[in-house]
Amino acid sequence: MTAARPYPKTKIPARGTLHALQRLTAGYTPALNRQVVAAGGFARWFDRQLAGAYDDRWATQTAAWWPSIDATPAQVWQRHESGVEELWRADANYQCWSLVRRFGSQRQVLETMADFWEHHLHVPASGEVGPFRASYGRTIRARALGRFADLLQAAVTHPAMAVYLTNANSSKRAPNENLGRELLELHTVGRGQYGEDDVKASARILTGWRIGLWRDWAVSYDPAHHWTGPVTVMGFSHANAAADGRPVVTAYLNYLARHPATARRIATKLARRFVSDNPPAALVSRLAGVYLKNDTAIVPVLRALVASPEFAAARNAKVRTPAEDVVATWRALDVRLTARPRNGDDEVAANVVLWQTSSLGLTPFGWQRPDGRPDDAAAWSSTSRFLASVDVHYSLSGGWWPKRGMTYRTPASWLPAKKVRFDQLVDHLARNLHGQRATPLLLRVACEATGCRPAEAITRKHQLVRWEMPRLLTVLLDSPTHMTR
């Protein structure tokens, strides 16, 4: 038996603060907690996050790692045509950047909301939208904390959305209904609020945009292809007499963004993402009211959501998606990216992160249907998903894959002192990886996994540090505490 000795215990946040950080960021870290403390507490940190007060250089710097991210659509297409980088690779680059942004950004709330809106206004990253996918992602991110009305305008009229939902060459002679329907069903009011005549009118309003598909991808608006004549969609009516229908589109999207049914749909999806799979009706109603009262501004809705008793009561009620699991694991293990990827190099860490999410079941924006990634526990709680997560956790804990373009912590660096009891080490790891003290159950599982006794002395020369630290780290990463948020 070894008597417990004092050692420097990593400070942890209050339970309420930890819960909020787990929901609003890509994963807890001691550095994140220090940032909150330096801001003067969670409320002030949240204010600073919403105001964009934190440095955004990480996003700017990492965007330069993949040439296609900051390239214009014309340049992306030229790179495809010349054989430098095919469109699917350009999309993969964007997916990698979306993960790397969340991994290291100081603007964690912005990244969380950008991810939320990219799945609500979903356009897959799979090469099928031509050279426009990175441009679409940047468009969403730039408006992720603004007004939904502005975000909706930018997303629906973006060429990526036009290509994906086949509005790219919709004309007055042959209006394509895909975008007009999904705009109503998925992006705004939801099912049960409209009929087939509304869908037809919605499609007619959206005619006129032209894109040179698989030629030069040039984007234009041609009034000669816009359907003219009176249109009515639910309570929206317009003479639609001018050949240039873009003002009608603006008025129509503004109407939809401010519709009470849209307010309820947005409130429901936010509550499902940040509170629970089955959000309380009272919370949804209150959030919808805040949304309408503030002219679709999203920040007041987020404030109301985080301040709600329903949010406070919903700890550990959400299962992490594959992308969230991978990014949170990198953050927990304090993996550091050290090298930018080369074109097509799938063994460097900044690219490997994408294939890790694929092994868990879904890459970012890899969902092929227009309804976006599922956001409930049932979608991400299968045995195969858990076993895949175990494999990724173990590989990262051991520093076995990836091996290039990053640095891992050494096993000995996890010791809080030269000599500690095993139960102290487990508590230290729980404080650093989970942001909370070790529970008796966690200690018992750690003992069973490693063969160590709670009072056993652990030093750098102990076999646990020399050989078994990946097993111990994986115990914490495979736990429900890490797999939920």
Image: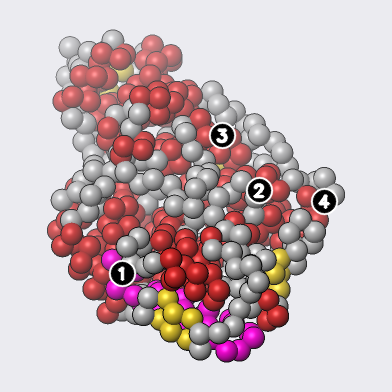
Q: Name the quadrant containing residue 170.
A: bottom right
Residue with the mark numbered 3: 355
Q: Residue at x 67, y 66 (%)?
A: 169
* Image coords of residue 156 (percent x, y): 53, 68
- Callout in the foreground (4, 1): 1
In space, the residues marked 4 and 1 are separated at their CA atoms by 44 Å
The quarter of the rendered structure image containing the C terminus is top left
Q: Residues within 10 Å of mark 2 (few under 14, many from 20)?
A: some
What's the CA distance linking mark 3 and mark 2? 16 Å
Is tag 4's residue or tag 3's residue first in the polypeptide sequence? 4
Q: Position of residue 329 (x, y in %)?
A: 42, 36
Type of the residue with mark 2: Gly
* Residue at which label 1 appears: 261
Which residue is painted at 68% across and 81% down in the image?
223
Observer-side mark, 1 or 2, equals: 1
**Which residue is identified by label 2?**
127
Kindly check if marks 4 and 3 are in contact, taking CB atoms under 8 A apart as contact.
Answer: no
User: Bounds of the magenta span?
Assistant: 240-264
Residue type at tag 3: Trp
Name the kind of residue labelled 1 in the image. Answer: Ala
> For the residue marked with disc 4, what is the amino acid?
Glu
Say whether marks 4 and 2 touch (CB < 8 Å). no
**Mark with earlier residue (3, 2):** 2
Q: Residue 81 bears which disc, if any?
A: 4
Q: In whole angstroms, how far apart are the C-alphas of marks 4 and 2?
A: 14 Å
Q: Nearer the viewer, residue 354 or 241?
A: 241
* Residue 203 against residue 388 in the figure, above or below: below
